[in-house]
Amino acid sequence: MDAATYATEAAVEQNHWWFAVRRELFAREIGSLGIGPDARVLDIGTSTGTNLRMLRELGFARVSGLDASEEAIRFCAAKGFGDVRQGDVRAMPFAPASFELVLATDIIEHVEDDGAALAEIARVLVSGGVALITVPTFPSLWGLQDRVAHHKRRYRLHQLLAAIRRAGLEPGRRYYFNYLLFVPIWAARRLIDLLGLKLSSENEVNSPLLNAVLGAVFRLDARTAPLLHPPFGVSALVVARRP
């Protein structure tokens, strides 16, 4: 991501509606897996530490992080989020079968060869280990945030599932989420492009009232999406296991 985008994210990730509710969703998914707090966990693409915050709150003590950006690692260190290494998701500096749980949330869309990234995730998982994978979805939603984050693509769920299977992982639970805000986000991105607004991140467009309203909507969404399996959403989540 752009350096200014990291700075914006670092300042807001603790309380911003998107990051806060997404952590709640991930925490529920991880809680359903029955993985103990002594499990070895890897967060790939830590950015400024939003998942590391969640993992610490869940009580995991053996957590490693990986990010390609020195800027992101500095923010994680400043927040006291522990061991974060610099590296490429396509060639991670970890031995095979090193982790019981891998988080790859909004990371594989950043690399040209997403197949290589997913194969690396499979390599570092123990047999029976689990990967929690999320990606941005629907090319029609392409906008400012994709550009400043240097995304290569947005997915459809069937494309993500096919890539996961090719990497040797078995998809389990899968669904789109952030479906209730799909149309407002599409409209906001078209408006930002139409007006030519110069922002370092969409996260700058916020206020306490807006944060509360969007947080309430997204919280309802995150509770219902795993049950309703909507046919669209701003993001998709897959829980995959290494056989």
Image (spheres, rainbow, N blue to C red):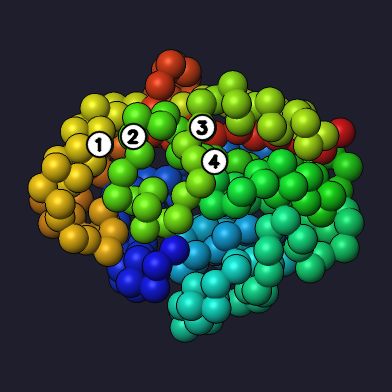
Label of residue 134 in the image: 4
At a point 42% along the width and 56% down the height, the residue shown is 149
On the rendered structure, is 153 left or right of 222?
right
Q: Secondary structure at mark 4?
A: strand
Image coords of residue 154 (percent x, y): 47, 37
Q: Earlier in the sequence, mark 4 or mark 1?
A: 4
Cα distance in 3D space between marks 3 and 2: 10 Å
At a point 51% along the width and 32% down the height, the residue shown is 155
Image coords of residue 150 (percent x, y): 45, 55
Visible residue check, residue 212: no
Label of residue 141 in the image: 2
Comparing labels 1 and 3, the label whose residue is closer to the camera: 3
Do callouts 2 and 1 mark residues in contact (Cβ within 8 Å)? Answer: yes
Badge 1 is on which residue? 185
Cα distance in 3D space between marks 4 and 2: 16 Å
Q: Earlier in the sequence, mark 2 or mark 1?
A: 2
On the rendered structure, is 158 left or right of 54?
right
Label of residue 155 in the image: 3
Comparing labels 3 and 4, the label whose residue is closer to the camera: 3
Comparing labels 4 and 2, the label whose residue is closer to the camera: 2
Quadrant containing the N terminus in the rendered view? bottom left
Quadrant containing the C terminus in the rendered view? top right
Q: Secondary structure at mark 1?
A: helix
Which of the pair 110/76 is nearer the observer? 110
Do callouts 4 and 2 mark residues in contact (Cβ within 8 Å)? Answer: no
Going by the numbered disc 4, the residue's amino acid type is Thr
Q: Earlier in the sequence, mark 1 or mark 3?
A: 3
